[in-house]
Amino acid sequence: MFAVVRTGGKQYRVAAGDKIVVEKIDGEAGASVTLGDVLLAGEGSDLQPTDGLTVAAEIVAQAKGEKVIVFKKRRRHNYRRKNGHRQNHTILKIVAIGAAEKKAKAAPKAKKAEAPATDEAPAAQA
């Protein structure tokens, strides 16, 4: 089974057991993450409805990407600036697809129980 999920402004086609590199997600290595924004899901050429469908993933590592050099120059003005940037990203391992999100209903509030009858008389106020 496969799914197309959106996270970090990008879309990824995933299947159980895949490892993907996404924009940074908060969490420690080994923590589980649920990706709820499922755009498409299916088995082969058969598509399934995505209502309430989620993708369970596990954080493998928090890492940094390759260094990108930013070089600015304005010719004939002796202007040169060189900067580098390394983007933070998260490596995810897809554990399961199709774990429907079960929204637990709030337990109905119990009616206020009547005060238990006691042998003691209420204290008189002075």
Image: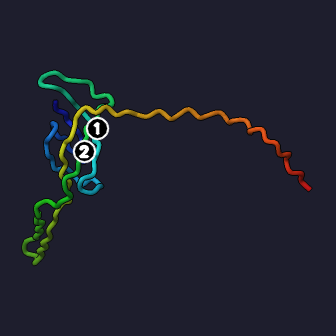
Q: Residue at x 25, y 44 (%)?
A: 7
Q: Residue furthest bottom?
A: 78
Please give the count of numbered marks on the rendered protein: 2
Q: Residue at x 65, y 33 (%)?
A: 111
- Mark 2, Cα crowd under 10 Å, few <14 / some 14-19 / many 20+, is some
Q: Residue at x 14, y 59 (%)?
A: 65
Please name the residue that numbered disc 2 is placed on.
7
Please name the residue that numbered disc 1 is placed on.
37
Tell me the amino acid under the disc marked 1: Asp
Marks 2 & 1, CB-CB < 8 Å contact: yes
Q: Nearer the viewer, residue 91 or 75?
A: 91
Of callouts 2 and 1, the N-terminal one = 2
Q: Residue furthest top?
A: 46
24 over 45 or under it: above or below: below
Name which quarter of the figure residue 113 lies in: top right
Residue 3 at x, y = what percent?
19, 33
Q: Residue at x 25, y 31 (%)?
A: 98
Q: Residue furthest right?
A: 126
